[in-house]
Amino acid sequence: MNTKNAGHDDSADPLVDSTLQDGSKQDSLPQDSSSGRQSLGGQEKQTLRQRAEVEALVRVEDTHTERDFSSMVEHATDMIVRFDADLRHIYCNPAVEDQLGVPAHAWIGKTPLETGGPRAQAEFVEHSLRTALETGEEQEVEQSYPLPSGIKHFLTRIVPERDEQGRIRSLLAITRDITDRKQVEAALRRANRALQTIVEYTQLLARASDEATLLVGACRLLVEQGGYRMTWVGFAEQDEEKTVLPVAQFGFEAGYLDTVNITWADKERGRGPTGTAIRTGQPVLTRNIPGDPDYEPWREAAIRRGYASSIALPLQSGGRCFGAFNLYAAEPDAFDPEEVKLLTELANDLAYGIGALRNRVDRKQAEEALRESEEKLSLFMRYCPNPVYIKDENTRTVVLSHHFEKMLGKPLSQLLGKTSEELWPPELAAGMRADDEKV
């Protein structure tokens, strides 16, 4: 007898359809003898119903997961972009517009080179995308991007996306702004570089035995350790034209100093950074050489040699400015306040070192002149045929010609330091004393 639950028609239940969702037939199911239909036992029906419920839950979960993922991408602070196999943008999340100021729809359907951005950056991006497409491997690249707010630094990870057959159907690029990190790294490098420069600069000041070695060494150190493109030292001549004479240089100069013709007088070729620094005794910073009107006489020559910014630091000693220390950088606005402070201190140390070396030279020259004078006086006193003497303020003899040894019959060692009264009879001594008082 055919048994049915009241109010339930098995023929309308999808779980008892002869073809299951996986496409297999239920030919082995038992036949109902009265209707000829296949029938299911209670256990089989329960199994199929549970399977359908699980599949329905999976579909719901997949929908929720996809919705959550989409929401996460839309609200991500990282820029997330999808490219097709022709390197065309097919999706850009809102972070692209937030960070680059470009509406997402402006890029859809375009390759990086077609977006109208900086060509160098676009070519770099396309090369990285093509590498990921050809190798099937993830790529991680860094790039810099010029924006109105300044240079931004980004780290991009490019991930190939594959279909069920394993073929790459698209590329997902996830880009993070690492500007803050790069600035911290740059600051750390500058600090380490500054420390190394100070250490070597101190050693240079201690070791330098002459002015030329000190000047060239200081210029070399600031190029090799400081990373500047070129440095030079100029001295303020006291001629009629108030010429600035280059005395030392290092780095990429390429004949620049042969053509600059700088003066420290208050006229056109003296109103640049070098002449102004010497006249005022203050550092002069040129943040952007191509755009600075005071740099007009030297702008073309500077640009050809890759100088984008510069600083002129006065060299002063004893309240007088005697020259300037000049540094050139390949980047505009390359000298921040901390760097200016450090360079000013180094210039002051250089000026002190120059003064110390000059004092040493002056002292040495004075000592040599004194020695020469003493030698000449000694020769004169030895061979002078007349009695000649020199006395101190107490009228005691400090120098005597050798003629006195013959006159008094005593060696000079017994005559030096004596007064006239100790050397001569009273009458002669009184006359000599009177002569001494007239001097």
Image (cartoon, grey):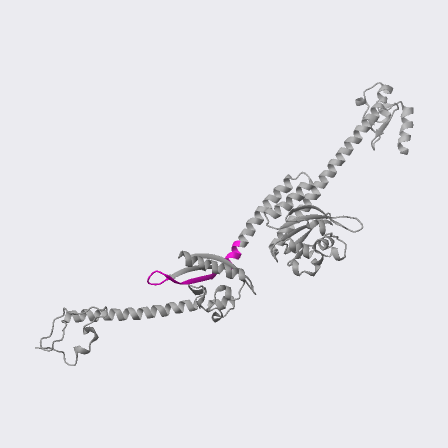
For this view, does 159 lie left or right of residue 148? left
Front-lying residue, 196 or 307? 307
* Coordinates of residue 52 in the picture (x, y in percent): 23, 71
Front-lying residue, 426 or 150? 150
* Coordinates of residue 322 in the picture (x, y in percent): 73, 48
Q: Residue at x 59, y 46 (%)?
A: 224
Q: Is residue 377 visible?
A: yes
Q: Is residue 291 magenta?
A: no
Q: Is residue 182 magenta?
A: yes
- Say if 243 sits above or below 45 in the image: above
Q: How many marks overall?
A: 0
For this view, does 337 lie left or right of residue 398? left
Magenta range: 162-185
Which quadrant of the figure contains the N terminus?
A: bottom left
* Coordinates of residue 308 in the picture (x, y in percent): 63, 56
- Say if 240 sits above or below 120 in the image: above
* Coordinates of residue 43 in the picture (x, y in percent): 15, 69
Which quadrant of the figure contains the C terminus?
A: top right
Residue placed farthest to the bottom in the image? 7
**Would you identify the image quadrant in which residue 369 lies?**
top right
Front-lying residue, 413 or 95? 95
Q: Residue at x 26, y 69 (%)?
A: 55
Q: Is residue 152 visible?
A: no
Front-lying residue, 273 or 229? 229
Q: Residue at x 89, y 33 (%)?
A: 437
For this view, does 329 lie left or right of residue 265? left
Residue placed farthest to the left in the image? 1
